[in-house]
Image (tube, rainbow, N blue to C red):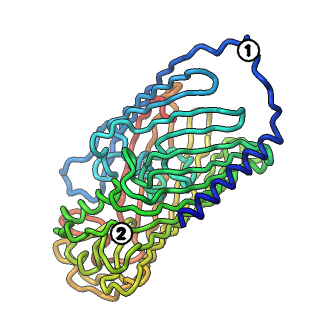
Amino acid sequence: MNKIIVSFLGLSVSFVATFAEAQEPNVATPASQAAPASSNSFDLGIRGDCTHDFSKDQGETQNCLSLTSARLRVLHQANSEVSAQVDVDPYSTPKSSYRNAPSGGLRPEPLNGDFVSGYRLVWLPRPHLEVSIESYDGTTKLPSVSGLALANLHNDTGWRQSAATLTYNLSLLSDMQVKFVVGNGEGEYRANVDPQQYFGFRTSAEVVKGVRLILGVSVDGNDVGSDEYEYQINQYEQDCGIDASQFKDRRGASTQRLAAAVELDGSLERAKDLLLGIGYQRSVVSDLNKKSLSRPTKNDLNSCRKYEASTVFVEDESAKAVNTIQRILFNVNGRYRITKSIFAAVDYSLLKIDTGSVEIFTSCNSYENGVCVAAGNSFNNMSINSYTFGAGLDLAPGLEFTIEMYKSSYDKKYAKSFYDAPDGKVADTQEFFNARVSYNWR
């Protein structure tokens, strides 16, 4: 499979390069022309949040006020062809869909002291061709234009990784961009930890002024050993008492992703000042070896009080089937500027989960002390609805204040997938209020 993908990427790159040669004149640089002097630039961005979690007991400490991000970006431009960028943020999370969210249990925190939240080394060998080595969030990331802190939390692209990219700007359509990516693998940021790689393709084009179409696909060969895999296994060990030493198989799971989206950038003639993103995303995670375990089975997960439904992967304990998990996400988000300094924003997501041959979701008819005591039928599918709405105010150039409400709901009451509620109870709905001040964040 990897050889086929590599061959496809090679042919695609050759085609793009040949097409570019036909479009671009070969302009020689005069020998007497001096190379431009190098330059440095620095950029600082800060975000602070005040989050109220309605599931906490009265009098319990809320996460207010907390520093969410403190990013220092350093850009060095060696000349017109080579540049390098490094972002340092001690609060950055490796999970891209949660990078905009407040801290405090809502997102994985930095791992292993990874304060370098992003980097990029770029070479421009031709006017429309860009080659880079960078930290990369995935080719299937959906547009999120609302600017709300709790928007699109189920945007599933895998954790950040180190990757090589080749990007070409074509003139087939207005502002068309094609990107090929070869990476270590999702969640492999500091080093490559398995023999299987990540391959991705993403293209976007402005079909009419102000309207952009986006398409992305990717294949991640194996997730065992990645930061995301280790984080999940450690969570199972800490929260459920599952013995992680039983998961010895280095053939974990492969992930195939697909995304398609339409984005309005605010310049559409009939929708001035309207930013809008409409996206579809599908992730299919498949076990690589049915005869040996790299993940918990349904029986293992019975020892958990609860687990996160949107990220769970369960193996077939009978060892007779290669289990496959499918997650489908529909997302709509927008932002509209009411006045020069005031805007309103909204985000809605529907996540559908199918756990294949294992019916892991069991309905619950009654709870006691936060534990299901009367289980019902089991299912291999479930859905989560979540929406966020809010408004913002530009206090000064570069200084923005936003407030928002967030609500997420399961389609049923489940025995192991729920939200905590006050007084030790559980609920199928979770709500947050958040107020944010951000400086120079874009």
Quarter of the view holding residue 344: top right
Residue indicated by mark 1: 31
Residue type highlighted by circle 2: Val
> Label 2: few (<14), some or many (≥20) within 10 Å?
some
Q: Where is residue 341 in the image (x, y as percent from the top left)?
A: 57, 33
Give 398 or 245, whichever is nearer the viewer.
Answer: 245
**Viewer can see residue 264:** yes
Q: Is 93 rendered above or below residue 298?
A: above
Q: In this view, does 322 lie above or below 28?
A: below
Identify the residue at horizontal 36%, vertical 58% (top origin).
431
Please tell me which residue lies in front, 385 or 130. Answer: 130
Q: Residue at x 23, y 60 (%)?
A: 234
Q: How many labels does the image show?
A: 2
Q: Where residue 59 appears, x then y in whole percent? A: 18, 51
The residue mark sitting in front, 1 or 2, is 1
At mark 2, the secondary structure is loop
On-image quarter of the N terminus:
bottom right
Please give the residue where the numbered disc 2 appears in the rendered image: 312
For disc 1, the neighbor class at 10 Å (few under 14, some 14 to 19, many from 20) is few
Task: Name which quarter of the figure residue 248 lies in.
Answer: bottom left
Query: Does the image show residue 269?
Result: no
Residue at position x 76%, y 16% from top? 30
